Amino acid sequence: MLKLYYNPISLNARRVWIALLEKQIPFEPIELSLDGDQFHDDFTAINPLQRIPAIVDHGFRVIESLAILDYLEAKYPTPSLLPSKPEIIAMVRMVETVTVVELQPETIPLTRPLVGLEVDPQKLEAAQQRVVNILQFFEKLLDEQNYFAGEQFTLAEVVAGTLVPSLPLEDYPHLKAWSEQLSQRDSWQQTEASPEAIKAALPNVRKLLERRS
């Protein structure tokens, strides 16, 4: 059986978790506490980079969330989370990449004050403006569609939908409606971190952010 190494508050791991549920792939969840579990020899043998998520599928290991999602789509193509039209594939990939490469790093300065860490005001302002630019871009891409690919739920939702809903969306009606729609899906409800899990993880989050300073 496929094994998923994850933590319930990890956005990167949640993407994979959601995809597994949406595709109805049986898996064994293996939770790492992130207060040292990721540095143990047994997990380092799976992922030398010592971070989640990682999967092991019948002895084949894959690390990095986007690579895992591509693997799952290729290995378990039904139900499909990737359209067939080239233009829509490009749309999905664009949303995935912008979310991971551009948006997610810009949320780090916004997170620091929430765990009691200082942040340079200029860096904070720059990050806030960058987030606004990306949300405006996503708002125009989504328009009045149910999903980024129109009526099909895709990997664009799996990736952007684990991050964008945590941001203020009052000025983005299409994204807000899209976010509310995602929150009704079983996969979102099953993978939503509890307040207790978030509170317990805050010290570890603080340590991770301090390492980035």
Image (cartoon, helix red, strand yellow):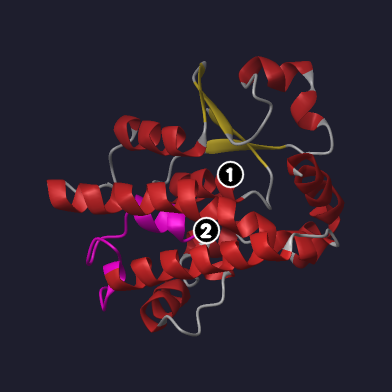
Residue drawn at (29%, 52%) of the image = 92
* Dot 1 amino acid type: Ala
Find residue 161 and name its label: none
Which numbered disc covers residue 162? 2
Image-based side of 191 in relation to 135, left or right: right
Where residue 4 sits in the image (x, y, percent)?
58, 35
Which residue does the numbered mark 1 point to in the structure image? 13
Residue 69 drawn above or below residue 59: below
Can residue 33 be seen? no
Task: Tell me whether circle 1 and circle 2 mark residues in contact (CB < 8 Å).
Answer: no
Q: Quadrant of the C terminus?
A: top right
Give the percent coordinates (x, y) of residue 156.
36, 54
> Height in image: 130 above or below 100?
below
Q: Secondary structure at mark 1?
A: helix
The answer to which image quadrant residue 110 occupies is bottom right
Mark 1 burial class by Cα count in 10 Å: few <14, some 14-19, many 20+? many
- Residue 180 seen by the camera: yes
Q: Which residues are magenta?
A: 141-161
Residue visible at 23% across and 66% down in the picture: 151
Residue occupying image coordinates x 33% and y 30%: 75
- Hey, which residue is sitting farthest front in the picture? 122
User: What distance separates the C-alpha of mark 1 from that of mark 2?
Assistant: 10 Å
Point 52% across, 15% down: residue: 59
| Quarter holding residue 112 | bottom right
Magenta-drawn stretch contains 139: no
Estimate the x, y position of residue 126 in percent, counting from the top left. Answer: 58, 63
Question: Earlier along the polypeptide chain: callout 1 or callout 2?
Answer: 1
